[in-house]
Amino acid sequence: MSNHEIMPVKILIFEDNNNLREGLCQLLMLREEFQIVGNFGEARQAKEIVMNCRPDVVLMDIDMPGINGVEAVRQIRQFDLTTQIIMLTVFDDNNHVFDALMAGANGYLLKRNVSDRLVLAIQEVLEGGAPMSPSIARLVINQLHVEKPTNQYMLSEREKEILRSLSKGNSFKLIAADLGISFETVRTHIKRIYDKLHVHSQGEAISKALHEKLV
Amino acid sequence: MSNHEIMPVKILIFEDNNNLREGLCQLLMLREEFQIVGNFGEARQAKEIVMNCRPDVVLMDIDMPGINGVEAVRQIRQFDLTTQIIMLTVFDDNNHVFDALMAGANGYLLKRNVSDRLVLAIQEVLEGGAPMSPSIARLVINQLHVEKPTNQYMLSEREKEILRSLSKGNSFKLIAADLGISFETVRTHIKRIYDKLHVHSQGEAISKALHEKLV
DNA sequence: TTTCATATCCCCCTTTTATGGTATTGATAG
DNA sequence: CTATCAATACCATAAAAGGGGGATATGAAA
């Protein structure tokens, strides 16, 4: 970034707390590479404002009167996929984080971390990173800790193989051909699988297999 | 952390590059609150070493001769869920990151960020955070983004409702009863759904619905 | 107005699944 | 050696699902 004088980073702020908003402006204006192109106490016109200002980075509070920050992100993302959006919030609970990230936010900073990390975070989103307060990152990672295939139903390897094939949508006939065994054998396995899963139809079995990641 | 003299943070290092390993030790020993309880050039005995050293934080290189860092994490996690593990790596591709995080790593630092961020990262994992290089965080978030139900097959609302019910394992009969419509109507809807999804059986439909999150 | 998409219902016939059996083999645990 | 289990295979019957029709009603769009 050697040319910040001629191409400053344009920043747009939505934050309903006047003191914090002012503070953010002060903090960012200390940096000559940043240019604040707007600051607003509510997000009602977020879409239009972003269209007019064409910011590089949006700082978006989550909890605002009128429409909240997550909804604002959603609206912005309907027409703009490139502007980087960093959420600023006091919430570190699950729902707010995921709502925001799924709406299309690129970063998620807790307000208590703003003073240390905001400038760094802005640089990071511009480089394609996703700055997050570490406690937020932990939440996100926990979400990823997908349950490994449990075998609580004591399916044999062969049974799991058949359930896996069934769950791909294969018919008994096809499963038999795939595995090189007879149609009747497939049926016998299927019967035992249904017994073990406590189900009585293909649909229930597939649903259970996919939802509980049995295969 | 006012009592670091009496309770130093015990750190264990696995890193096959001798220079980097030495560098890490030097860097961390500058801090009196850190105590390096071991440093190893390979992870073959990782399990036993961790059991003996009882570290607070493990720094684990991914690419090592013998067993790699991800496998080492897996082994450690078999008996120890509380020790914080930070991966150190040059890789920022998808598979390595997810493999490591799913194996149970708590943080993921790129080696090019080590000098800036290692000390901070160690503090962060101890506080329950998940320090990640921002580009890693972006990868993780992108993984989360894929959740939106697509309607590329142009299913009507009623059709989606029926597919949703079918995907729970319900029979045609039950679906009809649930929705208060006739069995034949359910069949008509199902036929159209199969047409639109280009499938020919319940199994394929459910598989497609659940995998592509159509419902 | 006519067309189109959607939702509803019915019939006939075929194919696939579901449920209940029985039976043989090979491996393994006691 | 025997009991058990997993995997294999078959039969009969019943239930469910699939594929082809056709039909009516409604509201929105062309």
Image: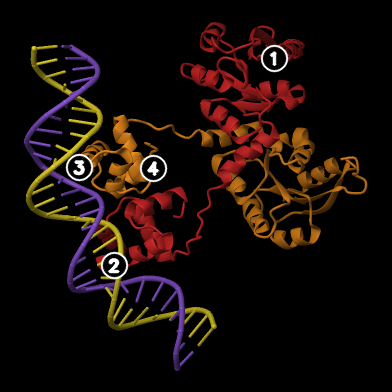
Chain colours: A orange, B red, C purple, D yellow
Estimate the spatial distance between the alpha carbons at disc 3 and disc 1, rounded to whole Å.
Answer: 58 Å
Using the image, name the chain to which the residue with label 2 belongs.
Answer: B
Q: Quadrant of residue B33?
A: top right
Estimate the spatial distance between the alpha carbons at disc 4 and disc 3, rounded to whole Å.
Answer: 25 Å
Circle 2 residue: B181
Q: Quadrant of residue B141?
A: top right
Using the image, name the chain to which the residue with label 4 belongs.
Answer: A
Lateral position of residue B202 relative to residue A28, left or right = left
Lateral position of residue A3 relative to residue A50, left or right = right
Q: Which mark is residue A210?
A: 4
Lateral position of residue A99 relative to residue D13, left or right = right
Which numbered disc, 2 or 1, marks the residue closer to the eye?
A: 1
Do pointers 4 and 2 mark residues of a single chain? no
Mark 4 in CB contact with mark 2 (< 8 angstroms): no
Residue B215 image point, x, y percent: 44, 55
Residue B16 image point, x, y percent: 66, 14
Indicate the secondary structure of the residue bearing disc 1: loop
Which numbered disc, 1 or 4, marks the residue closer to the eye?
A: 1
Which numbered disc, 3 or 2, marks the residue closer to the eye?
A: 3
Tell me the residue at 65%/31% (across/down): A134
Query: Which of A193/B183 is in front?
Result: A193
Estimate the spatial distance between the alpha carbons at disc 4 and disc 2, rounded to whole Å.
Answer: 28 Å
Which numbered disc, 3 or 1, marks the residue closer to the eye?
A: 3
Circle 3 residue: A184
Which numbered disc, 4 or 3, marks the residue closer to the eye?
A: 3
Residue type at tag 1: Asn
Residue type at tag 3: Glu
Estimate the spatial distance between the alpha carbons at disc 1 and disc 4, rounded to whole Å.
Answer: 42 Å
Q: Which mark is residue B17?
A: 1
Quadrant where the C terminus of chain A sits is top left
Mark 1 in CB contact with mark 4 (< 8 angstroms): no
